Structure formats: C-alpha cells, structure tokens
Image (cartoon, grey):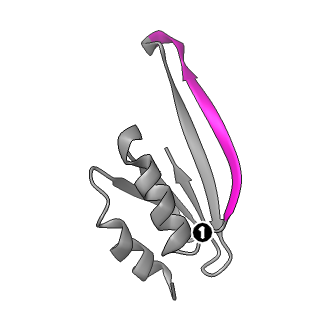
Amino acid sequence: MENRQQLETLLTGVHNLRVKTDDKRRIRLDVPSKELPALLELLKGRAGFLHLSAISCVDWPEDNEFELVYHLWSYQISTLVSAH
C-alpha cells in the first residue's frame, strides 16, 4: 500500500460501501454489518491498517439500535479509518 489513492481503489471492491473523507488523515466508511468482516480483512491485509485503536458504540434508543464503530490506523499512510 503506497498511498491513499490505492486505498480508495481497494475500497471499490466492497459492496454497499459509502466513503466520506473528513480531511487528509481521516476517512469514514459506512458499511452494512454483513460486509464488515470483509472490510476489516481488506483493511488489515491489503491496506496495511494494522492498529485497531478503538471500538466504540453509538446507542440509538429511539430506533432500538446501536452502531459499532471500528477505528483503525495505518502507519504507512498516516490515516485513520472509522468503519461504521
């Protein structure tokens, strides 16, 4: 993984993925829960996101749901990905 442009190319292979770039070092990825394992494997294996810095939970009581957010860091491209 040489740069962020290659990351964006890799992400095109994930079904139903929405990508939002917050700034030069942060990317938000919204993915259906059934696609999450494949996304995390891709980020770790092919994109070099080796540091899982946190897992957080957002509670949506009015919808009777909660959302897990995985925060992953790449030392190679100095970028934080938040997978929702």
For the stretch drawn in magenta, the main secondary structure is strand
**What amino acid is found at the position of numbered circle 1 in the picture?**
Phe
Residue pictured at 56% horizontal, 36% vertical: 68
Residue pictured at 37% horizontal, 41% vertical: 34
Residue 32 in view, yes or no: no
Q: Which residue sits furthest bottom? A: 2
Report if residue 58 lies within the magenta region. yes
Q: Secondary structure under badge 1? A: loop
Relative to 4, residue 43 above or below = above
The image quarter containing residue 11 is bottom left
Q: Nearer the viewer, residue 33 or 56?
A: 33
Stretch in magenta: 51-62
Residue pictured at 44% horizontal, 75% vertical: 7
Relative to 17, residue 56 above or below = above
Q: Nearer the viewer, residue 41 or 70?
A: 41
Residue 2: image location, x then y, percent? 51, 88
Residue 8 in view, yes or no: yes
Residue pictured at 66% horizontal, 38% vertical: 56
Residue 76: image location, x then y, percent? 63, 81
Relative to 14, residue 63 above or below = above
Identify the residue position indicated by label 1 in the image: 49
Q: Nearer the viewer, residue 5 or 37?
A: 37
Residue 15: image location, x then y, percent? 27, 54
Q: Is residue 39 left or right of residue 80?
A: left
Report if residue 81 lies within the magenta region. no
Mark 1 surroundings: few (<14), some (14-19) or many (≥20) residues within 10 A: many
The image quarter containing residue 6 is bottom left
